[in-house]
Image: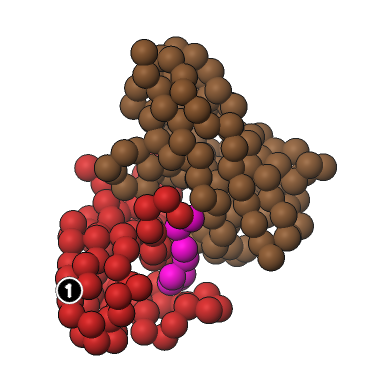
Chain colours: A red, B brown
Amino acid sequence: QSVLTQPPSVSGAPGQRVTISCTGSSSNIGAGYDVHWYQHLPGTAPKLLIYDNTNRPSGVPDRFSGSKSGTSASLAITGLQAEDEADYYCQSYDSSLSGWVFGGGTKLTVL
Amino acid sequence: EVQVAESGGGLAQPGESRRLSCAASGFTFSRYEMNWVRQAPGKGLEWIAYISSSGSTTYYADSVKGRFTLSRDDSKSSLYLQMNSLRVEDTAVYYCARVLPQRLAFDSWGQGTLVTVSS
């Protein structure tokens, strides 16, 4: 069981908007630690999509956006494309574990 | 171009040791904090080890503490994960990941190396 909780799967049609939630606790997200999001296709290197809750690294389309409130965070993807089909992970730091923690991952299916 | 590439994976028996390497290129390796993250078959990502840019500080997940040791050789731009007393549950793809400076996010990852622990 992961420290950060994500839905196992989400889906949407091309062009639609989907959101992926990430729920933590008072020792990680709620303690003020930032949330980061990664896109991962099996067999490839995970890719940083969002860092520090809302920031996109250079090269990441603005269709991807992040937000954080209280003990939770969300990743939104607008204008869904077939190439967005992948696994998405949230990550934060946990003070009680003295280390980084990930969500269990969410599989995005583009219908 | 920033690149990190893992190597050293393979088949090991329970109780055996194995050393993974991560070769970095395209950036000044000595200035960056580094981590190892793993993914067991059918499971999500799990952070397992961190090393500071100086190499003086390391942190480990409880699942590997006391069995795994992370080190670095800045002269070779390389990271090493010494894995001892391997268990079946250590079977996973192991990724090397660079820390985004001044942040706690991992901005560059390798493609991973598979370690299979089985008798």
- Point 54% across, 62% down: residue: B107
Whether residue B91 is visible here, answered yes or no, is: yes
Above-or-below relation of B105 to B58 = below
A89 is within the stretch colored magenta: no
For the C terminus of chain B, the image quarter is top left
Res A73 quadrant in image: bottom left
Residue B26 found in image quarter: bottom right
Expressed as whole percent of the image width and height from the top left, the position of residue A85 reads 29, 68
Q: Which residues are magenta?
A: A45-52
Q: Chain of mark 1?
A: A
Reading the image, the residue beneath label 1 is A111
- Residue at image position (17%, 74%) is A111
Secondary element at image label 1: loop
Front residue of B10/B99: it is B10
Q: Is residue B13 left or right of residue A13?
A: right
Q: Position of residue B91 (x, y in %)?
A: 38, 30
Q: Position of residue A66 (x, y in %)?
A: 35, 76
User: Do we see residue B51 in this rendering?
Assistant: no
